[in-house]
Image: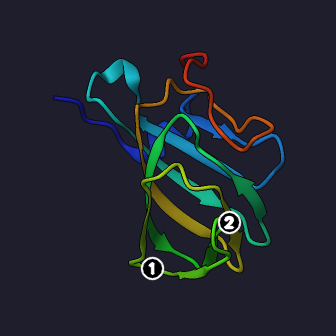
Amino acid sequence: MIVRDLKTAEQSSRRITSPDGNWESTRMLLKEDNMGFSFHITTIYKGADFRMHYQNHLESVYCVSGKGEVETLADGKRHPIGPGTLYILDKHDPHILRASEEMVMACVFNPPLNGKEVHNTEGAYELEAESL
């Protein structure tokens, strides 16, 4: 059994901040945990507006708090995000995430992240990044 506490994890190397200042993510479950997915609590800062394209991962995102929108670039559709909203990037969807308020998100990645990933120039995470 694995038991972790968010507050403790936030004060450790499991808390990663983006170089662009758009987000911070506490990596609660990683590849080394051998569960087949990773689980993160990510804060998207108010005013964030950035493009992502997870070419190597599938992601599910559940909004715990805050408001914003996700725009799918393939069709230009904008989907509001608020508490209780789940969006799933099941086709490696290029998208833009915008936060009108600070948003706290619970994120699941498959395959799992190693721990120190930040977005590359394409807005993706590399498959093999440094572990914590």
Please state the horizontal and vertical placement of residue 104, each as a whole percent of the image. Answer: 54, 64
Residue 117 figure quarter: top right
Q: CA distance from mark 1 to mark 2?
A: 23 Å
In the visual, does 29 lie left or right of 43? left
Please state the horizontal and vertical placement of residue 10, each as a whole percent of the image. Answer: 54, 42
Q: How many marks?
A: 2
Q: Secondary structure at mark 1?
A: loop
In the visual, does 85 lie left or right of 102? left
Image quadrant occupied by the N terminus: top left
In the visual, does 2 lie left or right of 91? left
| Residue at the (71%, 71%) spot, across then down | 98
| Residue at the (56%, 80%) spot, across then down | 79
Residue bearing mark 1: 83
Residue 95 figure quarter: bottom right
Q: Secondary structure at mark 2?
A: loop
Which mark lies nearer to you, 1 or 2? 2
Say which amino acid is labelled 1: Pro
Residue bearing mark 2: 73
Disc assigned to residue 28: none
Q: Nearer the viewer, residue 112 or 64?
A: 112
Q: Nearer the viewer, residue 20 or 50?
A: 50
| Residue at the (64%, 48%) spot, across then down | 53
Q: Residues within 10 Å of mark 1 (few under 14, many from 20)?
A: some
